[in-house]
Amino acid sequence: MKYLCLVYAQEDQLHSLPESPQDAECMAYSQQLTESGQLFAGQALEPVATATTVRVRNGEVAITDGPFAETKEQLAGFYLIEARDLNDAIRVASQIPPARVGSIEVRPVRELKP
């Protein structure tokens, strides 16, 4: 089953704390997951200030700068993985380096039905 592991962290702490992961460590973990056949995709995201939110209401497109919600932690990246079950997905998520300074939301991917 596919799971999306969403990486959340406070942007000002993501790279500034002593336990903060470096890009090389994240890339190494991604490579390990790729070699095991568990990683489908994963990317770090640019800072939340670069985000644009798009909504369509009554046929009208509304665009606002930034994310919809004001939160302490921002979406920093994601890993799309294959896991046997939720416990396996949690095991993978617990080893994602930014989990040390933020949090990882694990969500099953729902396959769309035609």
Image: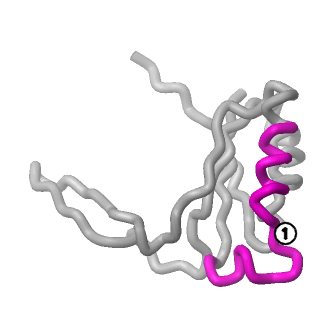
Residue 84 falls in image quadrant: top right
What span is in magenta? 11-32
Q: If the image is split into quadrants, where does the C terminus sit?
A: top left
> Can the viewer see residue 58?
yes
Residue 80 location (% of width, % of height): 66, 39
Residue at 83% x, 60% y is 97
Residue 107 can be seen, yes or no? no
Residue 8: image x %, image y %? 65, 66
Q: Residues within 10 Å of mark 1 (few under 14, many from 20)?
A: some
Q: Reply above or below: 11 against 78.
A: below
Q: Image quadrant for the N terminus?
A: top right
Instruction: From the image, tell me which residue sits under label 1.
Output: 100
Residue 44 at x, y percent in the picture: 62, 55
Figure label count? 1
Q: Position of residue 110 (x, y in %)?
A: 56, 32
Q: Residue furthest left?
A: 59
Instruction: Give the residue at the far front of this rendering.
Output: 24
Q: Is residue 108 above or below residue 38?
A: below
Give the quarter of the image for residue 83.
top right
Is the residue 38 above or below the residue 28 in the image?
above
Residue, x 87% and y 28% (percent of image)? 36
Foreground: 28 or 103?
28
- The colour scheme is one colour
47 to the left or right of 17:
left
- The kind of residue on which mark 1 rests is Arg
> Is residue 64 highlighted in magenta?
no
- What is the chief secondary structure element of the magenta stretch? helix
Q: Place residue 72 in its image quadrant.
A: bottom right
Residue found at x 75% / y 82%: 16
